[in-house]
């Protein structure tokens, strides 16, 4: 049995045999995904949700939530792309993200790897290292405030008095 495809342009409609049309373009198997409210899902439901999407569902809850968010972003960006990638390529990209970002969650840190945010951050040492910068900024601020004050007092008039009462004309 032959199948036919209808191609329409304006008001005209033409029917072609499937074999006459040429190679089919890949259909978008992956559709846009909505964001979900993670507080409504318990751990098992979240794991089932990830499993149904075909993405890894192991790790702590915070990692599962971040992984799902990253997957939603990848899939939705792929839907908007002119050259959509396959699900396998998206899974590979998620795996790369997981290796880079997921490691931080497993090690117990859910923030970016900034030295300021670490628990073992030595504030006193940081302050002493940057003490000269602080002093320089304070001196500049005082100098700027002093110059503004001297500008106001040069004529003994306020800026409003120098430029009139502020009313036009």
Image: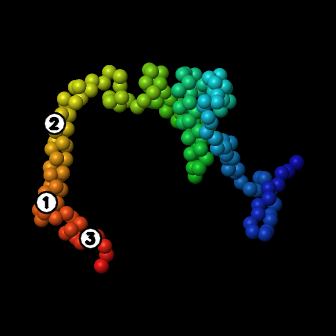
Q: In which quarter of the image is residue 77?
A: top right
For the residues bearing labels 3 and 1, Cβ distance under 8 angstroms: no
Residue that numbered label 1 is attached to: 153
Residue drawn 54% across the image and 36% down it: 70
Q: Is residue 23 left or right of residue 110?
A: right
Secondary element at image label 3? loop
Numbered label tally:
3
- Identify the disc placed on residue 132: 2
Secondary element at image label 2? helix
Q: In this view, does 128 lie to the left or right of 32?
A: left
Q: Is residue 137 left or right of residue 61?
A: left
Q: Looking at the image, is 147 positioned above or below residue 59?
A: below
N-term mark: 3 or 1 = 1
Residue that numbered label 3 is attached to: 165
Disc 1: CA contacts within 10 A as few (<14), some (14-19) or many (>=20)? few
In percent of width and height, residue 1 lies at 88, 48
The reply to whether residue 55 is visible in this rendering is no
In percent of width and height, residue 116 lies at 32, 30
């Amino acid at each position: 049995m032959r199948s036919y495809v209808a191609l329409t342009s304006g008001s005209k409609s033409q029917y072609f045999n499937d074999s006459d049309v040429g190679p089919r373009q890949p259909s978008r198997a992956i559709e846009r995904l909505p964001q979900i409210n993670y507080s409504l899902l318990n751990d098992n439901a979240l794991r089932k949700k990830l499993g149904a999407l075909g993405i890894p569902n192991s790790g702590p809850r915070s990692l599962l939530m971040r992984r799902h968010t990253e997957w939603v972003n990848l899939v939705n960006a792929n839907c908007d792309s002119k050259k959509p990638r396959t699900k396998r390529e998206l899974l590979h990209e998620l795996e790369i993200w997981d290796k880079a970002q997921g490691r931080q969650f497993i090690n117990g840190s859910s923030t970016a790897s900034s030295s300021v945010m670490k628990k073992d951050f030595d504030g006193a040492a940081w302050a002493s290292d940057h003490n000269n910068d602080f002093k320089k900024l304070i001196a500049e601020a005082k100098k700027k405030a002093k110059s503004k004050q001297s500008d106001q007092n040069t004529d003994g008039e306020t800026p409003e008095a120098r430029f009139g009462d502020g009313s036009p004309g």
